[in-house]
């Protein structure tokens, strides 16, 4: 718990907690508001898929709440229990957003392709990057000090890959929401007041990704500043 952690990382962690609260409270609020056309989350997802002539993606239910996701590996669009069969504003918005990811995948949208490529690096870098970097700093005053900078750099590079993943996730998520809103509007699925509420749900969800990216960036900057002070 160093000075840089307190001034850089802690504020972003607090932002993450606030973002999680916002997404849950906003989803719960609009999950009680039915859409005028009474279509379900499944209907909305299938509508977006049909509008993009995507015929090989299957929509299915998955247990839990806010566990909705698109799996590009097996082309399954999985909707959580509060979304799959619900006719609420929140359900339609979340389902349409996940269908937006399926459309990105079908069109091989650049940022999504890049993010998918970075998944192995992000998994490794987020877990081992900081540990390796701190280990490098830790041996700087020992008999292995000659290797400290090399070890630190390896950890920093690995963690930078994870940070890049978080940053690229932002346009991927924002674009999926934009696609969802555009199709819902063009097909007159929701009126403008309902679309406004869908945007509130999706904006709250996007805050969690913004907070994660800021936390990753702050953690990377902290490592760099600690190393700079050591030198």
Image (spheres, rainbow, N blue to C red):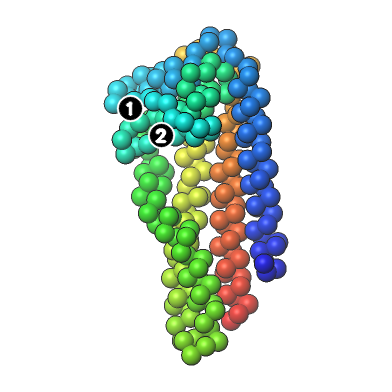
Q: Is residue 135 visible?
A: yes
Check disc 2 and report its element: helix, strand or loop.
strand
Q: Position of residue 48 (x, y in %)?
A: 41, 22
Is residue 196 visible in this depiction of the protein?
no
Residue appearing at x 57%, y 9% in the figure:
36
Q: Residue at left 70%, top 68%?
A: 3
Mark 1 closeness class: few <14, some 14–19, many ≥20 residues within 10 Å: some
* First in sequence: mark 1 vs mark 2: 1
Image-based side of 105 in relation to 221, left or right: left
As drawn, which residue projects farthest toward the top?
37
Q: Position of residue 147 (x, y in %)?
A: 44, 83
Q: Is residue 137 above or below residue 62?
A: below
Q: Which mark is residue 57?
A: 1
The alpha-carbon separation of the residues under discs 1 and 2 comes to 9 Å
Helix, strand or loop at mark 1: loop
Residue denoted by label 2: 70
Q: Residue at x 51, y 66 (%)?
A: 130
């Amino acid at each position: 718990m160093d000075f840089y952690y307190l001034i850089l990382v802690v504020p972003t962690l607090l932002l993450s907690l606030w973002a999680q609260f916002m997404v849950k409270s906003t989803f719960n609020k609009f999950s009680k508001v039915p859409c005028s056309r009474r279509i379900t989350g499944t209907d909305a997802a299938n509508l977006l898929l049909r509008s993009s002539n995507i015929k090989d993606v299957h929509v299915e239910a998955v247990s839990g709440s806010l566990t909705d996701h698109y799996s590009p590996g097996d082309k399954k669009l999985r909707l959580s229990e509060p979304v799959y069969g619900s006719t609420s504003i929140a359900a339609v918005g979340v389902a349409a957003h996940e269908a937006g990811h399926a459309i990105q995948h079908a069109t091989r949208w650049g940022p999504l392709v890049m993010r998918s490529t970075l998944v192995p690096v992000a998994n490794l870098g987020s877990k081992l990057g900081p540990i390796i970097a701190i280990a490098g700093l830790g041996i700087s005053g020992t008999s292995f000090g000659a290797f400290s900078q090399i070890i630190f750099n390896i950890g920093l590079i690995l963690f930078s890959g994870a940070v890049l993943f978080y940053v690229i996730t932002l346009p991927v998520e924002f674009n999926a929401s934009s696609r969802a809103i555009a199709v819902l509007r063009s097909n007159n699925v929701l009126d403008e007041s309902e679309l406004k509420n869908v945007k509130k749900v999706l904006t709250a969800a996007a805050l969690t990704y913004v907070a994660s990216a800021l936390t990753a960036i702050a953690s990377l900057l902290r490592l760099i500043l600690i190393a700079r002070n050591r030198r």
